[in-house]
Image (spheres, rainbow, N blue to C red):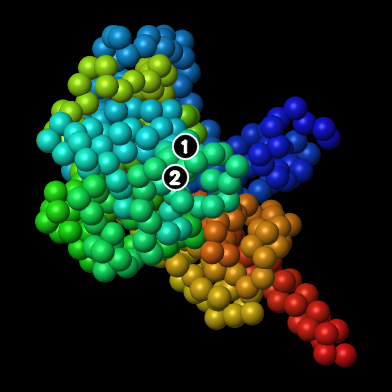
Amino acid sequence: MTSSLLPTYARFNLAFERGEGAWLYAANGDKYLDFGAGIAVVSVGHSHPHLVGTLIDQGRKLWHVSNLFEIPQAEKLGARLVAESFADLVFFTNSGTEAMEGAIKTARRHQFVSGHPERTRIITFQGAFHGRTLAAVAAGGNPKYLEGFGPPLDGFDQVPFGDLAAAKAAITPQTAAILIEPVQGEGGIRVAAPDFLEALRALCDQHGLLLIFDEVQSGMGRTGKLFAYQHSRATPDIMGLAKGIGGGFPLGAFLTTRAVGLCMTPGTHGTTYGGNPLATAVGNAVLDVILAAGFLGHVVETGAALGRGLGELQTRYPDVIEAVRGQGLMFGLRVVGPVGEFVKAALAEKLITIPASDNVVRLLPPLTVDEAEVALALTRLNAAAEKLSAERAKAAQRGAA
Ligand SMILES: *Cc1c(COP(=O)(O)O)cnc(C)c1O
């Protein structure tokens, strides 16, 4: 089929008509188990009745009024996020990259109003992903995403992930902040050690820098805590959220402390759509589900079952799966051979997975996934790994002959 969409994605030749919980239904009736959740977006499953009901109710009443007026739904969602986090203030966006843009601007402006206009640079980490706007691709530093788009925005100094000495050495009188994903998502589900985050916090305090956490992928319950940083004792000054926060409705946010956020006075930043009544009503509905008693405990339990099963799979097929890593319901399989081959093999078993860098296949099911669905996913992953293992053994035999 010729498409009128800009060819920025190599899409599977597959379209879905309907979704329910962890399941997606193709037009021909084929049923897929969704362990991608729209790249960690469909946090409480497809067509969750509470989200659908909220969307319809709010859709009938009021969609959009602009940020020139008070928006009770945004006030409520903001207050709830503040109550559950380190933060005092929230700015709503429509996407993750906008959340990170706002986070970066806030860090720079805080240094500016604090008498340090020279502090504009931000230390970031190899393998990072912060989005696709010009500042976000510069912060991420991935040469593939920078090529052909002119001079990268200046002001980012990148060091190896987990390397405290390198982060320390990268600090100059121009440094404003350190920016890190507590769990790298696109980078291949690389979990920052709690003591590394705590050491970064101490480093920031020592040098007057701000600590920014990008929890666009790891936040909203994905790792078994509402925010991944809560596995450590470190708290950031600024944090970006998106993906799971809207459950599929476009919504993002950055959160900050009062001490930092008050530099963002009227006129310094803005958004037309961000935080509108429809998006934030849905955001509240997502939070109703995630904050319900026992929900995060369920994520921890099903995540543990998935982790155990994946470990067994790796033991059974070390020729296909080299390593398993992750936390909560955010897992990565470092595979032997092309990632695309594994993703395709899983898709042939009607299991959706998501490729990442570092030769990793991501498993990011809806957080509402149950133990039976986890068991079924493991069966399908086993079948995919078995097939790849047999194919490779055959190819090796042919090579030897
Ligand atoms: C997806 C992602 C982003 C970008 O979010 P968009 O909504 O695609 O703009 C930023 N940071 C992280 C960690 C992400 O996973």
Residue 67's x, y, as percent? 32, 14
Task: Compute the Cα span from label 2 to label 1.
Answer: 6 Å
Q: Amino acid at mark 2?
A: Ala
Q: Is residue 230 visible?
A: no
Rendered view: 396 above or below 114: below
> Badges 2 and 1: C-beta atoms under 8 Å apart?
yes
Residue 306's x, y, as percent? 48, 64
Q: Is residue 15 visible?
A: yes
In the rendered view, does 350 fall on the left or right side of 68? right
Residue 242's x, y, as percent? 40, 38
Q: In percent of the image, x 64 and y 62: which residue is there? A: 339
Tell me which corner region of the image, top left, top right, bottom left or bottom right, holds residue 75.
Answer: top left
Rendered view: 312 above or below 188: below
In the rendered view, does 400 fall on the left or right side of 328? right
In the rendered view, does 292 fall on the left or right side of 58? left
Residue 216's x, y, as percent? 39, 43
**Disc 1 Cβ-to-ligand 1 distance below 8 Å:** no
Tell me which corner region of the image, top left, top right, bottom left or bottom right, holds residue 93.
Answer: top left
Q: In percent of the image, x 29 and y 15: which residue is there? A: 71
Q: Residues within 10 Å of mark 2 (few under 14, many from 20)?
A: many
Tag 1 secondary structure: helix
Q: Amino acid at mark 1?
A: Leu
Q: In percent of the image, x 71 and y 37: which residue is there? A: 7
As rendered, which of 11 and 376 lies closer to the eye? 11
As rendered, which of 281 and 183 lies closer to the eye? 183
Q: Which residue is mark 1?
A: 134
Quadrant (top left/top right/bottom left/bottom right) for the C terminus: bottom right
